[in-house]
Amino acid sequence: IHRALEMRGTLFHEIQAHKLALHDFGKAIAINPANAENYYLRGDCHMKLGDYELALQDYDQAEFKGFSDRCSLLLSRGNVRRLLKDNAGALQDYLEALEILKKTNDKISQIRAQSFIAFCYIDLGSFNEAYDMLSEAHEFNAAMVRTCEADITKHRSHPETSSPPDVPAEDVKALDELQSELFYSRRVDWILQYHMILCKYMTRDYHQARAIADICISEAYQRYIPDNYTE
């Protein structure tokens, strides 16, 4: 019966019915406490519902039970620790996750981890370290923007086919998907630079802060400003 509860709990989790998922994962864990994934998913439900202490307990149990996706666990636990104002603990988790991600080709997740690390440094008042991490993330993101722009140009230069001649058909993304990725990457770029301004301002490098601010408020960036850009 615990497998049925795990399956239904996972489905509830996928559709963001977190209270229902909590009920099923709780029962599944009571029957079979060895499954690390149940603790991880229940921890995620607790986090989404704002129960951060319970989320942290489940993430710790998932680690103890040997949850396989250590990078996801570290990022999730780091987020909870930061919400609990344990910035030192969060930083430790984020840094370890970043080392794992550096061995992969997942640049988006790497940029996320670098951003989280920078936010921790900001919370800790280490603005120079935060700026260095943001700058590194900004460089990665800028490379992604250039790649996306090049792919869009290729796509538009061959409107009669969905696949440019030098790219395998299975690797070609639709134009609307590429444009969405470009918009997202440029918005991330704006958010990174916003926090870079903060770092330079806090270290009294007002000239550099103004130079970055001029870019952020330029007409070219106006459409990428998110509603909430503090984190």
Image (cartoon, grey):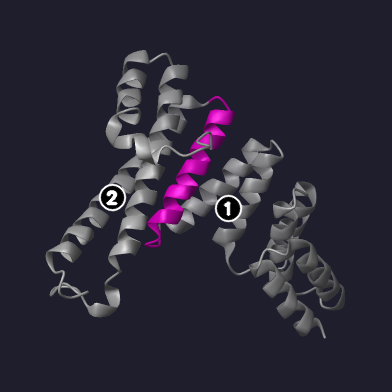
Q: Residue at x 65, y 52 (%)?
A: 77
Q: Residue 120, how many percent across, how many down?
A: 56, 36
Q: Is residue 117 above or below residue 101?
A: above
Main secondary structure found in the magenta portion:
helix
For residue 91, above or below residue 26: above
Residue 125: x %, y % from top left: 55, 24
Query: Is residue 196 on the magenta stretch?
Result: no
Residue 116: in magenta span: yes
For this rendering, which residue is in front, 155 or 3?
155
* Residue depicted at 83% across the width and 68% down the height: 23
Q: Give the class, few, some or many, for how many residues have Cα within 10 Å of label 2's Cα (few <14, many ≥20).
A: some
Indicate whether 45 appears above or below 165.
above
Residue under the image location 77 percent in, 74 percent down? 34
- Secondary structure under badge 1? helix
Image: magenta residue range: 103-125
Name the residue at the bottom extreme: 1
Q: Residues within 10 Å of mark 1 (few under 14, many from 20)?
A: many
What residue does disc 2 label? 145
Occupied quadrant, residue 26: bottom right
Residue type (three-letter) at the residue carrying disc 1 = Leu
The spot of residue 89 in percent (x, y) is: 65, 42
